[in-house]
Image (cartoon, helix red, strand yellow):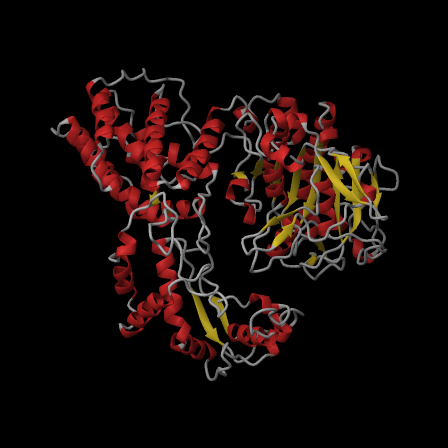
Amino acid sequence: MQIQCAQCHDHKTEKWKQQDFQKFAACFMRAQTLPLDGPMMKGLKRALVRDIDRPLPRFMREADLQPIGRAAPTALDGTAMTGTVRESIATWMTKSPWFSREAVNRAWAHFLGRGFVDPIDDIRPSNISDAPELEDALAKDFTEHQYDLKRLMRTIALSRAYGLATAKAPNVLWSHFRATPLGPNEMLDAVIDATGVDEALRRLGRFNVEELTERLRTLYGFVFDVDEEFDRPTFEGTITQALIQLNGRLIAGGSSALPGSAVGRVARSDMTDAQKVEALYMRTLSRKPSATELATWTALFAHPPPLPDPDPTKKVQRNPKDPLAQLNNRVPETREPKIAIVEDLMWTLLNSSEFVLNH
Amino acid sequence: MNRRHLLMLGAGGFLGAMVTRFAREARADGAIVARPAKAKAMILLWMNGGPSHLETWDPKPGHLNGGPTKAIRTALAGLSVSENMPHLAAVAQKLTVIRSMSSKEGNHQRAQYLMHTGYSPTPTVTHPSLGGWVSKKLGAPANGLPSFVSLGGPSFGAGFLGVSNGPFVIQKAGASPDNILPETSGDRFARRRALLDQAEQEFAQRSGSAMVDDRRAVYARAVSLMGSRDLGAFDVDAEPQAVKTEYGDTDFGRGCIVARRLVSSGVRFVEVVQDGWDTHQNNFARTKSQLGIVDPAAAALIKDLDQRGLLASTLVVWLGDFGRTPRINGNEGRDHYPQAWSCALAGGGTRPGLIGSTDAAGEHVSTPNYGVPDLLATCATLMGLDPHEEAMSQVGRPIAITDSGQPIAGAIT
């Protein structure tokens, strides 16, 4: 829901008055966070949230906050907040008729690239749902099943709409799937799943894989931070993102024939060349290669180009922010031309739009 | 075909070179006059945290508020600056110093947003930073370098103009960008690229998704950067020791060298960040040590650009979050003070001189005073952009480059 217009004046097109904004905002000035730890503990900091019965004096000194601090905490439908405001607002919010529709809309938008209401946080009478009956039915089911998010996700994931493929035709009411870039977490999980790089790291030893994964999550979250609120027909990306996929240590490690990784196992297996290609397509794209694709890669396996001599002057990248930086010196580049083809195949698949876009 | 079409077609290319950029400027009588752009590039020296105006461009020796800070005369008539800025004082004849700047945002995040975008933050719209506008309107150079680079800090993105116009961020200036070299040797990268291209073409065909082409364009930009003949512009290794010494052996000094190298190579907007100006405690010692870093580097940059004949076409701007409270607090510090602050400009068609003043206490700015939108409108105009030009935001409301800013007439030649 968007009420921010009413921060400075009564809303011009919706019913919200500036007072509605102030009274609602007042609900959030009745709690205080007190840090319990000084320095950061493993990226987490404990804090105590304490309920207070009046706003903190330092907020009341700020002219912008005074009218909010003086307003009586009230929910948007006029319900007065009593007792502990935090509890009161949480109860009101989950009892609100908007609650389930909002949750359902966000989940639908997350999986299908566009919410029933778009942008997803703009639920209001004059921004009509594209499919109100469906949205209501999902919301009803969500409410009736104790707000079970897993059930909601399962329902959406098993729907025909989610199962459709992208197509060139104009998209009317999810008649085709909208290609959507994977978010940072999905992307990282997909790369780790497809490559088995975590298993390879475990075997190399001296890596705390869980800690590394969390650090990678932070890095990916930072580099691939995307605004999910709007349905965008275009792909928006940065050079930094492309570079981390092209040359970053995670993709490089995931497409190296490390013992224990998918590439390592496939490359050193007794599969035929065609089976190797198929195995990696299945792992990354969950489909078999087309005849053309198979022909391209088996031809390379049949006549692998000779590998260049290792370049002694090649600069080692020093990027202290990359959690896998130490992997660099640990693993020499392969000298076997056929293994190199398996690596190239994995690299190509991981960098492909088919892998990176949910389609 | 109008000017905009020409610009879009020719961004960075052959046509771009033929078209002189013009900014329209409204005169008092309402007539619109076209003026050619003076600046091809802008370097923002960003003083993160809010530098005290009284310890930099507007010292008040002799007043209680002035504290122990002494003033020195400069090469610019009428301008005295902190004694800790001898290098900038010596190049002051090149500077436009504005002492009557005033704004309303006293919180770091909000003030930094305002200074970069010309707007106070609102929940509905993410405004583009000036760097984002410059990137969008002037395009990337043909040599593969990005149009907008930030050294030592995240800067601010291009908001609704899209992340492709946002800053290319280098955390530690002086070394190559992260992940710029392929992990494989010889021609393996080229081989992989060719195979990837083939896969992308097939998927674009099959899926019909325009996103594939957009994504390929981003990849192409990354690969051009990897192979750019001017990639060395990010590196300071090739600089003579004398140059490195003059700028100073600091991250900010190296940032200023890289900024000069980048604008020489066609980059349009470079931000160099010096953090550490939030001097609530121990203001005098800390501003002195900050200036020990910033003063030699900024002065060396201006001199260097001038000697290379680049200053006329490069706008350098020294700016921070806000000023600081003229009254010294109990911790020998100064707190946030947006009501009065100073900024400095050089090159790019600026008119050297001192503009405006504060009262003896450093608390109130003289009339006329200027806001952030006016400052950014000045920069936009010098860069050949029309400060009132609008683009459609994601909420369907057109937003101009600045929030009704008027170019500061005295700052422009």
Quarter occupied by residue A143: bottom left
Which percent across, then down, holds residue A109? Answer: 38, 57
- Farthest-out residue, left: A270
Residue located 83% across and 37% down the image: B74
From what the image shows, is residue A95 above or below residue A190?
A: below
**Near-viewer residue (A242 or A107):** A107
Can I make out residue A289 in this image?
yes
Can I make out residue A203 in this image?
no
Which percent across, then down, holds residue A71? Answer: 59, 79
Which percent across, then down, holds residue B245? Answer: 65, 27
Which percent across, then down, holds residue B324? Answer: 71, 55
Quarter occupied by residue B78: top right
From what the image shows, is residue A134 above or below residue B332?
A: below
**Near-viewer residue (A119 or A63):** A119
From what the image shows, is residue B324 above or below residue A272?
A: below
**Near-viewer residue (A355 or A333):** A355
**Near-viewer residue (B214 or A204):** B214
Q: How many labels, in total?
A: 0
Quarter occupied by residue A286: top left
Q: Is residue A283 left or right of residue B323?
A: left
Residue located 56% across and 71% down the image: A14
